Image: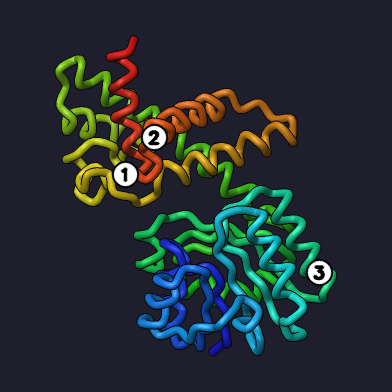
Amino acid sequence: MANIAFIGLGNMGGPMAANLVKAGHKLVAFDLVAASRNQAESDGATIADSAVASVKGADVVITMLPAGKHVLSVWDEVISSMGKGALIIDCSTIDVESAKQAHALAAKHGIASVDAPVSGGTGGARGATLTFMCGGEDKAFAAAKPILEKMGKKIVHCGGAGAGQAAKICNNMILGISMIAVSEAFALAEKLGLSHQALFDVASTSSGQCWSLTSYCPVPGPVPASPANNDYKPGFATALMLKDLTLAQNAAATAGAATPLGKHAQEIYKAFDMAGNGGVDFSGVVRHVRSLAAKG
C-alpha cells in the first residue's frame, strides 16, 4: 500500500481521502479548515501541521483545491519536499493553462505529475464512483491509475499535460447546456398541462434522452435520487457549474472556438447565482427558467 498525502479536504476531497483510507493506504492529510481536518482524522487519516509536512515520505501527493492559483501555490510550496520518484496528482477543476504550468513545475523538479479532475459530485466522491479525466505522460498515468481506482469507477487517459482539464470543461459545458434544455422542456410542459411523469416517460426513451433528464431530472418525482426531490441540496452546486462554464468560455476565447450555447448557459447560471442560488444544486436552474416567463 502507498503512503499518500492529501491536501484539500472539502466536500469532494474529504470523502475521496476517506476512500483511500478504507482501501488500506496510509494517508497523511492537510487542510486550512479545522472542521475538515477533524473529519479526516475521524475517517482514519493522520493530520499534518502543514502542506509541506504532509508530503514528506509520501509516494503519492493528491491535491483537491478551488482554483488554478491555489494549485500552483501549493505545488510550488510542496514539490521541493517530495522524494525522488514520487507522483503528484491534481484532482481540482482548474484552467488548462494553470494545469500545464503545474506539470512544468513538477517536471522541473523531476516529479511525475497528472491532472485528474473528476465528475460525479459529492455522491460519487462518497461512493467511490467518480470518473477521472487524466492528463499527463503515459508512465505517470500508469502510476496514478491504481490510486484513482480506489476513488472512482472510470479512469480515462485523455492525453498530455492539461488534457484532463480540457475534457472536464468540455464535458461540463455539455452538462450545463443540457440541464437548461431539460429545464426549459419541463417548464413548457407545465404550461401546456403535461405532467412531469408523462414528459419523462416519453423523453427518457426518445431522442430527447440525456443524463440531465434520466439521472438528474430537475423536477421532483421521476428520478427519486435527483436533488429535485431533496429541495435541490447539492450534489453539484450552481457556483461550481458557473465556475466550470466560465473556465470553458475562457478556454474557448484562448483557443478561438465558437461556443454560443456555452456562453448563453454561462449567462443563465450567472444570473441564477447572483440571485442568491450559488449553494443550490445546479439542477435548480429550472426555477430560474420558470421565472423568466413571469418576467417576459
| Image spot of residue 184 (x, y percent) | 33, 24
Residue shown at 70% from the left, 61% from the top: 72
Label 1 vs label 2: CA separation?
A: 9 Å
Up-down relation of residue 198 to residue 35 (above or below): above
The residue closer to the viewer here, 158 or 233, is: 233
Residue 179, label in figure: 2
Name the residue that disc number 3 marks: 107
Quarter of the image with the C terminus in it: top left
| Image spot of residue 13 (x, y percent) | 47, 67
Q: Answer with mark 1 or mark 3, whichever residue precedes in sequence.
A: 3
| Image spot of residue 105 (x, y percent) | 79, 65
Q: Quadrant of residue 155?
A: bottom right
Up-down relation of residue 175 to residue 202 (above or below): below
Q: How is the image coloured?
A: rainbow
Name the residue that disc number 1 marks: 216
Q: Are marks 1 and 3 in contact (CB under 8 Å)?
A: no
**How many residues crowd mark 1 within 10 Å: few (<14), some (14–19), many (20+)?**
some
